[in-house]
Amino acid sequence: MIKKLLRLLTLLVAVSFLTFLLISLSPIDPVRAYIGADMLLVSQEQRGMIEAYWGLDQPIINQYFQWVASLVTGDFGTSLIHRAPVIDVIMDRFLSSIILIALAWLASGLFGIVLGSIAAMKKGSWLDHVIKGYCYVLLSTPGFWLGLLLLMVFSVWLGIFPTGLSAPIGVTATEVTFIDLVYYAILPAATLSIIGVANVCLHTREKLVEVLNTPYILQARANGYTGYKLFFRHGLRNMILPAISVHFASFGELFGGAILAEQVFSYPGLGEAIVEAGLNGDVPLFLAIVLISACFVFAGSWIADTLYYMLDPRLRKGGS
């Protein structure tokens, strides 16, 4: 546990410093982003006062350590776009993003493992070829294009799902129910999960095919086990560990895909917030979301390691 926490701390320091450095070298002007259209009315003296107030007149390394010192005390800064504390902006969008990513992650994992298992058990059949072809097509399909296609079919033509947002228009935040949040997240989640199925499915198939060619499976076949009885008794446990590893490692891909999906569906989550922050020079909000995404990806690998320990008796017994 201590080693994991030290790795997480090292990761956050490296990610935050590199992100801070890249932003400082970019053409983003935080002062212009803060003032907006009235920038032409601001004199050089007023600009200097604003830079001094935000600490932008100091060397980059001093700015970084001041930001870290504020971060340690729980102060993420003030969003230049929303004119509100960064932590409030993040908390306002966090639940929407978590629901979206959770739905996509669960659906892609479930369908990926099921389809991959079917393809492996039916190796060489037409069903195997159909599933592999489906996965290859998905791997080459842009996420934004698939999102636009689903939006056009299920929202515009059929009118089953809303065309965007994460809650009904004209409803206050206190009146929005959990069912509303899930309903508005279905199409964006479907976009992410349909594409995410491919990696899990192909990896599951390859691992299960490898398992089915091992000597103990041949012995099980000789003992009369066939079909899905053979799969559930001998194949599933040996195939599930690599599948879990790949699926939890996809946390980062899901967060990256959520950025595109939220843009297509105008879904107000962290993905849309980080794009908005990047385009408008909202450095405090941008840095905070980058750190959250790093923690999110790290948590995926951490949970995968924990599940490995729980599911593999050799690790619990300390075997090499």
Image: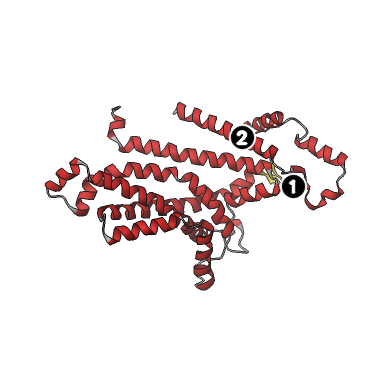
Look at the image and tell me whether residue 212 can be seen.
Answer: yes
Q: Quadrant of the C terminus?
A: top left
Q: What element carries label 2?
A: helix
Foreground pick, 297 / 119: 119
Q: Write the residue at 80% across / 35% down.
A: 52
Residue drawn at (20%, 54%) of the image: 227
Element assignment for label 1? helix
Q: What is the three-letter code of the residue carrying label 1?
A: Ala
Report which quarter residue 287 is drawn in: top right
Compared with residue 177, is residue 152 higher up or lower down, i.e. above or below?
below
Q: With respect to residue 259, does 149 lie above or below?
A: below
Q: Which of 162 and 207 is in front in this view?
A: 207
Residue at 69% of width from left, 29% of height from top? Answer: 61
Front residue of 176/302: it is 302
Residue 18 - label: 2
**C-alpha gap between disc 1 and disc 2:** 21 Å
Up the image or down, 172 lies above or below 289; here it is below
The residue that label 1 is drawn on is 33
Q: Position of residue 164 (x, y in %)?
A: 57, 62
Residue 310 location in percent, x, y? 33, 36
